[in-house]
Amino acid sequence: MSDLNVTIGPIVYGATGRRKRAVARVRLVPGDGRIFVNNKPADEHFVRKTHMMQVSDPLEATDTMSKFNVMARLHGGGISGQAGALRHGIARALVRFDEELRPTLRKGGYLTRDPREKERKKYGRKRARAGFQWTKR
């Protein structure tokens, strides 16, 4: 029992990313740069090229695109929110992989969680802030 440094399986770096109502649970696994979302290729989930560019931005900024495969579980929100959540999760997982990548990711704005969310509807109002139309006479 002297060999306690034996690793079982590949080293995995995980993190959670959020944007709006979307939540992305991300795992970085050593690989060749493929991205999977909910067990299917990311380009099937994200149809727009802008979303795919947004998702791969942290990997390209740190030159780690060809080092990892990204496995992500997304739920909640819409497509744009999910793309932002995935980008946030990938950036946080990269920091777990190498703390020296933090300044690069911070400078690009990938580690900052976008705090904007939809405001809840209030009672006595039509929407969050818009009231019902009122006529004096």
Image: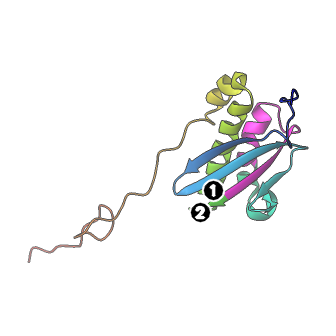
The answer to which quarter of the image holds residue 46 is bottom right
Q: Cα distance, mark 2 to mark 1?
A: 6 Å
Q: Position of residue 31 (x, y in %)?
A: 89, 43
Q: Residues within 10 Å of mark 2 (few under 14, many from 20)?
A: few
The residue indicated by pointer 2 is 78
Q: Position of residue 20 (x, y in %)?
A: 52, 54
In this view of the protein, can residue 47 be seen by the observer?
Answer: no
Could you tell me which quadrant the C terminus lies in?
bottom left
Depth check: give the residue in front, 121 or 72: 72
User: In the picture shown, does residue 135 fall above or below 108?
Assistant: below
Taking the spot 74% from the left edge, 31% from the top edge, the residue there is: 97
Q: Residues within 10 Å of mark 1 (few under 14, many from 20)?
A: many
Q: Position of residue 126 (x, y in %)?
A: 30, 71
Marker disc for residue 82: 1
Q: Which residues are magenta?
A: 53-73
Q: Viewed as shown, does residue 106 lie left or right of 57?
A: left
Q: Amino acid at mark 2?
A: Gly
Q: Amino acid at mark 1?
A: Gln
For the residues labelled 2 and 1, say whether their Cβ atoms are less than 8 Å apart.
yes
